[in-house]
Amino acid sequence: MSVTIEQDLREYLDQKFSNFERRFEEKFDKIDQQFEKIDQRLEKIDQKIEKIDERLNKLEIGQARLEGEIKRVEEKIDGLDKRQGFQEFINRGVLIGNFPPFKGG
């Protein structure tokens, strides 16, 4: 009788263990699927961050170029201002030299 009880108990435990093992594997499969989804989302996020980084670098390069152009334009404007001031000085000298002195009366 004892052998039958042992065998029945072994079969019962094997059945419960196999059920437990199957449920455990199903849960782990679901967890693995969730991790795969998370990994895919993280890859998409990484790609988007890389694109943003590339765009930011392009903006920084563009900004540096614009700053260089602004400097050049400012230098040209300063040069034109100096030329204009010099031209006004010459024009005044020419105007004054062309008119006879004013005699009161």
Image (cartoon, grey):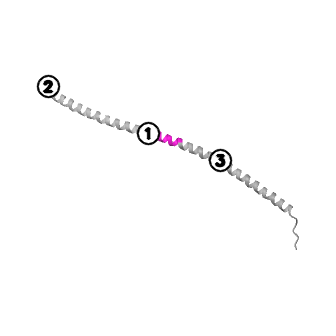
Q: Amino acid at mark 2?
A: Val
Region in magenta: 46-54
Question: Given contact means CB atoms under 8 Å apart, are the residues at marks 1 and 2 in contact?
Answer: no
Quadrant in the picture for the C terminus: bottom right
Q: Compare marks 1 and 2 and give the one earlier in the sequence.
A: 2
- Badge 1 marks a residue whose secondary structure is helix
Q: Residue beneath label 1, please?
A: 44
Q: Nearer the viewer, residue 76 or 24?
A: 76
Among all residues in the image, which is located at the extreme bottom?
A: 105
The residue lying at 67 percent from left, 49 percent from top is 71
Q: Specify the principal SS of the magenta part.
A: helix
Circle 3 Cα neighbour tier, 10 Å, few/some/many (<14 / 14–19 / ≥20):
few
In this rendering, position of residue 2 left or right of residue 50: left
- Picture quadrant of residue 95: bottom right
Q: Nearer the viewer, residue 39 or 81?
A: 81
Q: Amino acid at mark 3?
A: Glu
- Badge 3 marks a residue whose secondary structure is helix
Quadrant in the picture for the N terminus: top left
Question: On screen, 101 above or below 14?
Answer: below
Q: Nearer the viewer, residue 79 or 6?
A: 79
Is residue 47 within the magenta segment?
yes
Q: Residue beneath label 2, please?
A: 3
Q: Residue beneath label 3, please?
A: 69
CA–CA distance between discs 1 and 3? 37 Å
